[in-house]
Amino acid sequence: DRKKKARLSFPPSFRVLHVEDDAILRKTFELRVLKKLGVPFDVAVNGAEAVRLIIDEKREFALVVMDNQMPVLVGAKATRALREGGFGGVIIGMTGDPKGCSERDEFEASGLTECVDKDTPGIQRVAQLISSFAVDEKPGTS
C-alpha cells in the first residue's frame, strides 16, 4: 500500500506533544504532518496543560511542537517552565507572530530548539525535524 510506505518508522518511545489552542490549526497540522508521517502524538490545548503532562505527570515526549499565543499559559512561559522543570527534549515553536515583535523575541529566547512561522515552509521544516527521528527499517521487517 503506497500510503503506508510514505509513513516512517520511529523508535518505540518516540512521541510528540502538539500544543495548540486553535482547533482548526491543530487538526490541520495533525493531518498534514503527524498522521501523514505516522507519528504517535498527544495534544495539549494550552501551555499549562503541556507543563502538567510533562512535568507533573512525567509523560515522556521526544519532541514538543508549541504555539505561543494561547490562553492560560503562553508558549514562551510554558517553554521556560518545561526547561526549568528538566525537560531536555526538542521544543519547536510555531508562531504567527512576525519576526521582530516582542512576543516572538520572548518566545525565541524562552528555550526553544527552533522557532518557525505558521506557514507552509514552517510546517515543512517541522515535518523535516520530526522525520529526522525516524529509524531505518531493515529489509523484510516491515
Image (spheres, grey):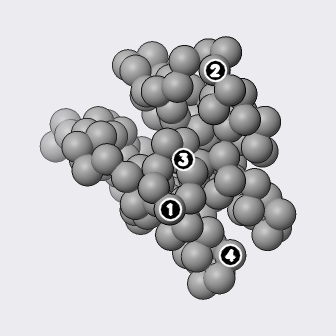
Amino acid at dot 4 = Ile
Label 2 sits on a secondary structure element that is loop
Quadrant where the N terminus lies?
Answer: top left
Q: Quadrant of residue 108?
A: top right
Measured from the top left, where is residue 58 in percent x and y? 65, 80
Residue 133 seen anywhere in this rendered image of the structure:
no
Label 4 sits on a secondary structure element that is helix
Measured from the top left, where is residue 99 in percent x and y? 62, 16
Q: Which residue is mark 4?
A: 55
Q: Which residue is mark 1?
A: 72
Tell me which numbered mark, 3 or 4, is placed earlier along the sequence: 4
Cα separation, mark 4 vs mark 2, equals: 29 Å
Nearer to us: label 1 or label 4: 1
> Which numbered tag is attached to residue 121?
none
In the depicted view, which residue is nearer to us: 129 or 139? 129
Quadrant where the C terminus lies?
Answer: bottom left
> What residue is shown at x 26% (from left), y 50% (from top)?
23
Cα separation, mark 1 vs mark 2, equals: 21 Å
Amino acid at dot 3 = Met
Measured from the top left, where is residue 120 in percent x and y? 38, 19
Q: Quadrant of residue 7?
A: top left
Cα separation, mark 3 vs mark 2, equals: 18 Å
- Horizontal side of 14 relative to 89 (left or right) equals left
Tell me which numbered mark, 3 or 1, is placed earlier along the sequence: 3
